[in-house]
Amino acid sequence: MKTFIMYDSVFGNTEKLAQSIALTPSIKKNCVVKRVTETTIEEIYGTELLLVGSPTRGFRPTEAIAAFLKKLPADALRGVKAAAFDTRIPLDSIKPAIFRAIVKRGGYAAPMIAKELTARGATLVADPEGFFVESSEGPLAAGELERAVQWAVALK
């Protein structure tokens, strides 16, 4: 299955996840991994599985991911299986409680990415997934790279 993993990364955490996911045995045989700023729309045509990842920045994906997805024509991803992932700080680690409430209300990048993918015709093969970082700059929390691979194994 031709897989394309497109990501953006600010501190390198989402990039590490994308690279780890690409090594998943069921994916690595025919997989391309690229940063969104190095990706053209034409490159994703013919993809059977499109994975899009971004850090959560201000409750949203990065501007580069959002802009790329908005540029896609409405039916550009018809027939493409897709999944979205992000990096985020665990809700229970955010202090004080008022900030937790703001983040809970504001949301994360992956659900917004998933919404854009389906708006362009893609079929989601997994719920949007968040992977945890220890602080806003990282590093990834222990076990998250392994969890990302397990998440990818389940994608069909």
Image (cartoon, rainbow, N blue to C red):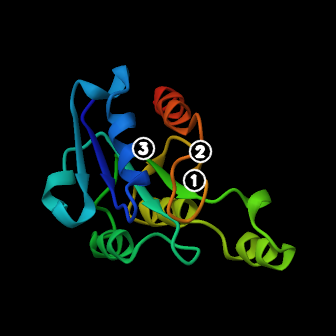
- Label 2 SS: loop
Place of residue 102 in the rendered image (x, y in percent of width and height, measured from the top left): 75, 78
Picture layout, residue 24 above or below residue 83: above
Q: Residues within 10 Å of mark 3 (few under 14, many from 20)?
A: many
Q: Earlier in the sequence, mark 3 or mark 2?
A: 3
Which residue, given by chain and number where applicable, does mark 2 sit on? Answer: 141
- Location of residue 76 by image quarter: bottom left
- The extreme right residue here reads 97
- At 57% from the left and 53% from the top, the residue drawn is 133
Q: Nearer the viewer, residue 32 or 8?
A: 8
Badge 1 vs badge 2, beta-carbon distance below 8 Å: yes
- Location of residue 31 by image quarter: top left
- At 28% from the left and 75% from the top, the residue drawn is 71
Quarter containing the N terminus: top left
Quarter containing the C terminus: top left
Picture layout, residue 91 above or below residue 27: below
Say which amino acid is labelled 3. Leu
